[in-house]
Image (cartoon, rainbow, N blue to C red):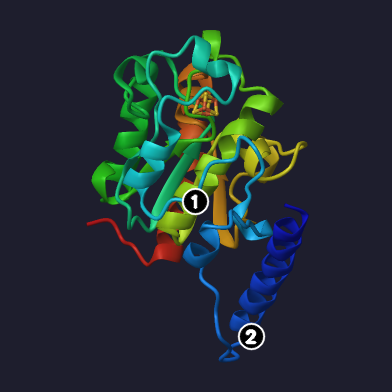
Amino acid sequence: MKEKKEIKEVLGHLRKLLMANQETGLDLPFISADSLKSLDIKTDRDSKPSGQPENAESLEQLRSLIGDCRRCKLHKDRNNIVFGEGSARARLVFVSEGPGQDEDREGRPFVGKAGKLLTKIIQNGMGLTREEVYICNVVKCRPPGNRDPEKDEIGACIPFLKQQLNIIRPEVICILGRVAGQALSKKDFRITRERGMWHSYMDIPVMPTYHPAYILRNRSRERELKGDVWEDIKKIMKRLGLSKK
Ligand code: SF4
């Protein structure tokens, strides 16, 4: 038994060494993962921190990996996971904080009043369709009473967003509102201060703007806020080389 354990250790080190050599481009013999399977040998690359999702190659695969997720306490009150929707090849991804009541009921992002306003911005403002962009949230389950998602909930769910962005690799991310800004940028992110300026996330240019629900809640400033959003959207359009059709 002791000998077998030692052999496993030696082969495990050898495999790591060979993998490292492969990455340098050297043509050396390779011991495949399959050939080591019978000896139950694992390398660092095989292990994932517990609770972390596997890497997916497509949005469909990622959705199926998320499954009936219970990685954070938001699973308790949700009706539906709101994964996100749109094109897997979108040049522009909108990221908001989390689903609201309507979204939780339908399992789709931005379907309530705020959703209608976002759709108007996409269609009437940018001359695009919702199917041409991608819309998703930092957390995929509705926080009870529409409260802000908490740090542990964001921490549990954000790997899914990162994978979505990795799969899509958009040219621009548009952050909608403070909470998404804080999750993707920094704790002291303030939407009133940071909107309209270019930031970066995962090496992707980011433009933050007001959340449509914020505009709807501030009717007395609606004109001014809509004007600000339009300025931000124009910057995105310029970067994407878009002009309204
Ligand atoms: Fe899982 Fe995200 Fe829903 Fe939490 S919010 S249960 S991590 S899908």
Disc 1: CA contacts within 10 A as few (<14), some (14-19) or many (>=20): some
Disc 2: CA contacts within 10 A as few (<14), some (14-19) or many (>=20): few
Nearest the viewer among 197 and 151 is 151
Q: Under 8 Å from ligand 1: the CB of mark 2?
A: no
Q: Amino acid at mark 2?
A: Thr
Nearest the viewer among 1 and 163 is 1
Are circles 1 and 2 on residues that touch, CB within 8 Å? no
Is residue 175 in view?
A: no
Q: In the shown orientation, is residue 169 left or right of residue 134?
A: right
Nearest the viewer among 92 and 86 is 86
Mark seen at residue 55:
1
Marks 1/2: CA–CA distance: 23 Å
Residue named by callout 2? 24
Residue drawn at 47 percent across, 23 percent down: 213
In primary-sequence order, the first of circles 1 and 2 is: 2
Q: Quadrant of residue 45?
A: bottom right
